[in-house]
Amino acid sequence: MKLIITADDFGRSTHINAAVIQAHRQGILTAASLMVAGDAFDEAVELARQTPTLAVGLHVVLVDGKPVLPPERLRGLVDENGRFPDSPARLGMQYFFNPRARRQVAEEIAAQFERFAQTGLPLAHVDGHQHLHLHPAVFPMVARLAGQYGAGGIRLPRDELRLALHYNSAQALTKLSWSIVFGLLSRWSLRALRELNLPVARRVYGLMQTGQMEERYVIELLRHIQADSAEIYFHPTTGPRTDALGPNPDELATLLIPSVRQAVADGGFRLSSYRDLPKGRQ
């Protein structure tokens, strides 16, 4: 069984960059998703070049982050600081109903793919900040460019609600809504991918416990997984925790702890990246 262990937000800060490299060199991390307009982007690229065993993909940012394009080219989508606001619902409505917004976001997505290409790093996979890459007006753009730029695969959240609630029933209604919304989006996205031959993992975990990927939960996941391919994604950092769903130093500890490594071995998993998945398997 192939198991991809990914850290999101690579390039967002020096603390996250440090956590990614430590978790790869000393822990079980196999991949990282790069924010190409992140404050620590240049450092992340240099670290990735020094660490060729780390599979690096593109973390498309269309919410809660900096764009690549100048803010004046994204009027109406960015705030007064030139950033995408942390408002996925509002931005999602604009992407869906506003043709001008769709043209702008198409240009921004293309700019992010091109900036990644300029690094010279192989494009291991593509995913999106807060999973906004799955938005029906956005996903066709992302998927087409992923194919053009030779991505090894694309992330579709395929978490398991029952398992998450068995572990922690807190915020059950929120988790239920996530399960319904992202379940529908992932199934729609699968149909859109059929002609592009881009691999996806059979299961992708991290949504239900985002920002709280604790040792006990991850071990329970590893004992439960039966799929022939799976991804588990994390938000590790060496710095302080800044919000409930964001980078968390405890997630770095989970990636480093020997009990989790032992659970990987006991489960017979082969640590992998999206490039190890067979094409045409969805």
Image (cartoon, grey):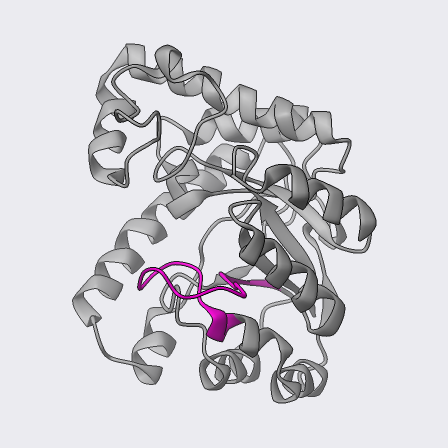
Q: Residue at x 26, y 65 (%)?
A: 175
Q: Position of residue 133 (x, y in %)?
A: 43, 37
Q: Main secondary structure of the magenta part?
A: loop
Q: Position of residue 148 (x, y in %)?
A: 66, 23
Left or right: where 245 falls relative to 273: left
Q: Is residue 280 visible?
A: no
Residue 99 occupies which quadrant of the picture? top left
143 or 16: which is nearer to us? 16
Q: Residue at x 42, y 63 (%)?
A: 159
State yes or no: residue 141 in magenta. Answer: no
State yes or no: residue 236 in magenta. Answer: yes
Q: Position of residue 234 (x, y in %)?
A: 51, 63
156 or 187: which is nearer to us? 156
Q: Residue at x 63, y 25 (%)?
A: 115
Left or right: where 115 falls relative to 221: right
Left or right: where 2 falls relative to 106: right
42, above or below 7, in the image: above
Which span is picked out in magenta?
230-251
165, above or below 140, in the image: below
Please tell me how many numbered marks the rendered image carries: 0
